[in-house]
Amino acid sequence: MIIDSHTHVQRTSGFWDSPPERIISLMDEAGIDMSVIMTYSDSPALVDYICQCVNQYPRRLIGYARLDPSGGEEVCRIFEESVKNSCIKGLKLHPVGNLVHPSADSSIKLIKIAATLGVPTLFHCGDEEFTLPMQIASAAEKCPEALIILGHMGGYFHVEDAILAAEKFPNIILETSAMPYPEKIREAVERIGSHRVLFASDGPGCPPDLEFKKVKLAGLDKGDEEKVLGINIMRILGML
């Protein structure tokens, strides 16, 4: 099974408009079986929208809640209830979007709730302040019990730092979306193990078909490729 670990659904205007049907169409073009979905915005009200999408397409979509840690106890309550109700399987944090440092007390509180509930925390990890790999690594250090996924594994200019962070902290997982270097996927597999790398696209912003081909271009062994393309995220989400 091929699972895309990072895509977006949300009704907006223009290019970013992404109802679930758009993601599913892109999945079909790329031969992807299931995708993890999240919204572009942090509004707690959109958690219900993610649940609706998952309930509409339960065999194709897996929901993560994108939340703003500065929302306090109400955000924590909504996240905990949505996971316990089984519609949400992970937490998404976008520190540059809400200007909350990855290791701020409010971020750590949400990450620890996710860990207690047995679900991963996916960070936007790129080239902007608050999203740098070593900044997120500080959160991983404070929450060794949590599984931390570095979405985009450092973006364009901080990939080496993402791999270094994963080497230092065993609770960090790297995810391949919107990172343009196939050879770095292979390097990550060689340095931290294929069991700690996830295929993802960041679709529809990045075409899932192109992102899938990027993993193929990494030239991984068959067993390693199968782990990256689906087995690892299935294990993380308790699907195996």
Image (cartoon, rainbow, N blue to C red):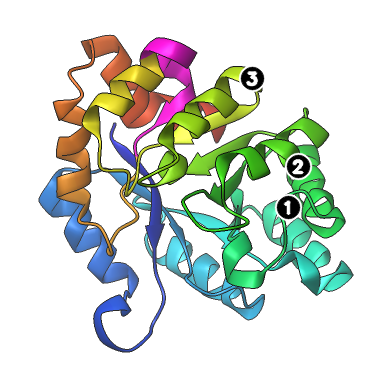
Q: Is residue 63 magenta?
A: no
* Residue 168's disc number: 3
- Residue 173 is left or right of residue 185, and the answer is right
Name the spot of residue 70 as percent of width and height, x first: 79, 70
Vertical arrangement, residue 101 with respect to residue 167, above or below: below
The amino acid beneath tag 3 is Lys
Residue 22 sits in quarter: bottom left
Vertical arrangement, residue 48 with respect to residue 208, above or below: below
Nearest the viewer among 112 and 172 is 172
Name the spot of residue 4 as percent of width and height, x first: 34, 44
Q: Which residue shows up at 37% across the image and 60% down it?
A: 57
Q: Which residue shows up at 40% across the image and 47% down it?
A: 155
Which residue is under mark 1? Answer: 84
Callout 1: few (<14), some (14-19), or many (20+) C-alpha neighbours within 10 Å?
A: few
**Range drawn in magenta:** 190-199
Which residue is under mark 2? Answer: 117
Please tell me whether mark 1 sits on a helix, a strand or a loop.
Answer: helix
The reply to whether callout 2 and callout 1 are in contact (CB within 8 Å) is yes
Q: Which residue shows up at 54% across the image and 24% down it?
A: 164
Q: Is residue 195 magenta?
A: yes
Vertical arrangement, residue 141 with respect to residue 94, above or below: above
Name the spot of residue 175 as percent of width and height, x first: 43, 37
Please tell me whether mark 3 sits on a helix, a strand or a loop.
Answer: helix
Q: Is residue 175 visible?
A: yes
Q: CA distance from mark 2 to mark 1?
A: 8 Å
Q: Earlier in the sequence, mark 3 or mark 1?
A: 1
Q: Which residue shows up at 46% across the image and 18% down it?
A: 195
Please tell me whether mark 2 sits on a helix, a strand or a loop.
Answer: helix
Q: Earlier in the sequence, mark 3 or mark 2?
A: 2
Q: CA distance from mark 3 to mark 1?
A: 32 Å
- Residue 83 is left or right of residue 54, and the answer is right
